[in-house]
């Protein structure tokens, strides 16, 4: 089962839900793989303190033009939707930072003058923590595109594990890449006007992908009922409500998982896990 933990905005408690679910599922005997796909700012490691066993550099294939073969026909520039390769007065220029690595330019070149060169975009780190597998990506500083690195992380998902994906916040390409092909998306929100606005965007985004979803309201007792009413009106299951607790906040600030630091919180996340399993089973 592949569960993606997502949110329409940052700071709602997405990482809290992902790490605590991984811990309680592992304690229940499930083979768990936690994947931190928030590659611009990964932070699952703060709470689970993994042992990193190996790392690998991730490179994106970008075009490299053989000027002796190139005739300047411009076919490569015509197919590129991102202006990563352009033809000016029969001179071909490449802009690797804009390239999405689709390979179209190489396919259409009649002279076979385009080959591939590697451009480093980040690293993958593999390890384990608390009895489960862990993988995280770190995007290279200054790199604009995170989806290729996220896809590399997701390529490691195995069928024998309960895979928990900590997705990037928002509803743009990184989040879509992270949650695509999941069995279930757990959307974490907070009972505030901003939280509700971004929850609506996230529900619409996940709905277009036709992935089953549910909502967790974090710090549920500090706001109003509009998030609950919205879930009822849209037919989106409300999976759990996490209370606003000083003890949970202190544990969070010290990098301690809530399910270990605050005994009653373990039951909250165990119930959440069962609720997700029931939804997927339907």
Image (tube, rainbow, N blue to C red):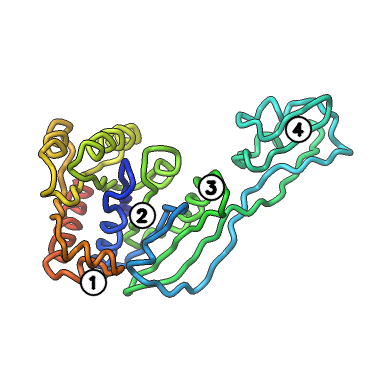
For image coordinates 42% across by 53% down, the residue present is 37
Residue 85 position (above or below residue 276): above
Q: Mark 3 vs mark 4: which is more N-terminal?
A: 4
Mark 1–mark 2 contact, CB under 8 Å? Answer: no
Disc 4 residue crowd, few under 14, some 14–19, many 20+, Cα 10 Å: some
Q: Secondary structure at mark 4?
A: loop
Residue marked by disc 1: 27
The kind of secondary structure element at disc 3 is helix
In contact (CB < 8 Å): disc 3 and disc 4? no
Q: Residue tagged by mark 3?
A: 148
Measured as percent of width and height from the top left, residue 100 is found at 59, 40
Q: Is residue 44 above or below residue 85?
A: below
Q: Earlier in the sequence, mark 3 or mark 2?
A: 3
| Disc assigned to residue 109 | 4
Give the side of residue 19 with respect to residue 168, left or right: left
Residue 135 falls left or right of residue 222:
right
Q: Quadrant of the N terminus?
A: bottom left
Of the image marks 1 and 4, the number of the one nearer the N terminus: 1
Q: How many other residues sit within 10 Å of disc 2, few (<14), some (14-19) or many (≥20)? A: many
Residues under labels 1 and 2: Cα distance? 18 Å
Label 1 sits on a secondary structure element that is: helix
């Amino acid at each position: 089962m592949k569960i993606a933990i997502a949110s329409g905005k940052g700071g709602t408690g997405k990482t809290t839900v992902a790490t605590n679910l991984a811990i309680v599922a592992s304690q229940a005997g499930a083979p768990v793989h936690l994947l931190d796909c928030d590659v611009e700012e990964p932070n699952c490691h703060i709470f689970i303190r993994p042992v990193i066993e190996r790392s690998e550099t991730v490179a994106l294939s970008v075009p490299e033009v053989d000027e002796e073969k190139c005739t300047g026909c411009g076919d490569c520039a015509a197919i590129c939707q991102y202006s990563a390769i352009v033809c000016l007065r029969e001179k071909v220029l490449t802009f690797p930072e804009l390239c999405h690595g689709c390979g179209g330019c190489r396919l259409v070149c009649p002279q076979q003058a385009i080959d591939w060169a590697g451009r480093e975009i980040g690293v993958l780190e593999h390890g384990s923590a608390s009895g489960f597998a862990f993988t995280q990506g770190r995007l290279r500083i200054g790199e604009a595109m995170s989806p290729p690195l996220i896809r590399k992380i997701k390529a490691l998902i195995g069928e024998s594990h309960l895979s928990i994906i900590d997705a990037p916040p928002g509803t743009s390409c990184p989040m879509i890449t992270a949650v695509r092909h999941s069995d279930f998306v757990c959307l974490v929100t907070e009972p505030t006007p901003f939280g509700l606005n971004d929850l609506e965007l996230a529900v619409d985004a996940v709905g277009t992908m036709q992935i089953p979803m549910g909502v967790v309201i974090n710090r549920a007792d500090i706001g109003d009922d509009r998030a609950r009413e919205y879930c009822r009106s849209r037919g989106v299951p409300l999976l759990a409500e996490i209370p606003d607790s000083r003890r949970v906040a202190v544990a969070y600030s010290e990098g301690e998982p809530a399910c270990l630091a605050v005994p009653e919180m373990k039951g909250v996340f165990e119930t959440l896990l069962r609720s997700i399993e029931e939804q997927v089973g339907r």
